[in-house]
Image (cartoon, helix red, strand yellow):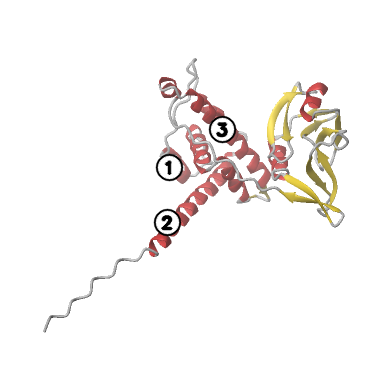
Amino acid sequence: MEQKKIKVLVVEPEKRPYVKEIPNQLESLQQEVGGYIQAVYPFPGPAALLCDEEGKLAGKPLNRALRNEEGHIYDVVAGTFLVVGINGEHFASLTPEQVGQFDQHFQTPEIFAKIGGQLVAIPLREAPPPPQPVYRQSADYAAAHGELPQFRLSHQANVACKEAIEAAIAQHYRNYSLGKEAAQQVTAQFGLDRVTYVLANTVQQKKWDGRFSPENKAWAAAIPVAEVKDSMGYDRRGEFVVDRTNSGLVDLFLRQVRDLSRNRTRSSVVAKLRQNSHIHKPSAPKKREPER
């Protein structure tokens, strides 16, 4: 069955990818890529790359390289392109696992140059924007103090963080083991404060779940999570509960995040001790010899 709206990954030249929901119509897809769409299938799973078929002829900026199994470039996509899922004969939303996979694959922007007659892709390492601070007050407090924009932005970031956690777990869980890259990936994107806030809320909302360890439940209970009630009195904290992933895996992810937090705290303390070790204490004044 064809979906009316689909979640796609948008990849623009010299920018990081982002997820967008668009109508599943030819006109909308063409508008996103800026021309007549061409579908190519460089991925092994049910996914397609949609680009402007005349992007290179139109002189659009080169965007990302496509590589074969040996890592050699066989083509370069020009202009903005989309990564979409496939369901039968129709384009479809990407699954959370696919979002994590392709976001990681196209995460680093590339620029291109000819060296020795060959086209070479050069990673463009951008300084990531600083994570948005977590708004820790209730909706009522935000309304009373004129801070509803900050409240709403933070809530949206909480929901996005929750989805990123689910995608990272799906991407890095293999052979009954969760790779450490899962926690590193999400904390690099959203910051340690927001990830711990979302995880604490998740464990608090699912405190009945025996798959969370007693240690993690005690940790979560000590972190205040403000109410997020709307005008109808509905508590919207459930919107950033990590609930599309097995709770046992979320517990493993939470252990990774807590290990990261402890390691960063330990590194900070060591750095301060080293810094202080360079501060020399003033030498004691020399004793004066008694006059003879």
Tags 3 and 1 in contact by the CB under 8 Å rule?
Answer: no
Please give the residue where the numbered disc 2 appears in the rendered image.
Answer: 269
Q: What label sits on residue 218 in the rendered view? A: 1
Query: Neighbour class for label 3 at 10 Å: few (<14), some, many (≥20)?
Result: many
The number of numbered discs placed on residues in the rendered structure image is 3
In the rendering, at what x and y percent does residue 221 appear? 42, 38
Q: What label sits on residue 97 in the rendered view? A: none
Above or below, 254 against 292 in this view is above
- Farthest front residue in view: 292
Above or below, 52 against 139 in this view is below
Q: Distance from label 1 to label 2 (Cα)?
A: 25 Å
Query: Neighbour class for label 2 at 10 Å: few (<14), some, many (≥20)?
Result: few
Residue at left offset 46%, top offset 44%: 214
Q: Amino acid at mark 2?
A: Val
Q: Distance from label 3 to label 1 (Cα)?
A: 25 Å
Q: Nearer the viewer, residue 206 or 189?
A: 189
Q: What label sits on residue 157 in the rendered view? A: 3
Q: Nearer the viewer, residue 175 or 224?
A: 224
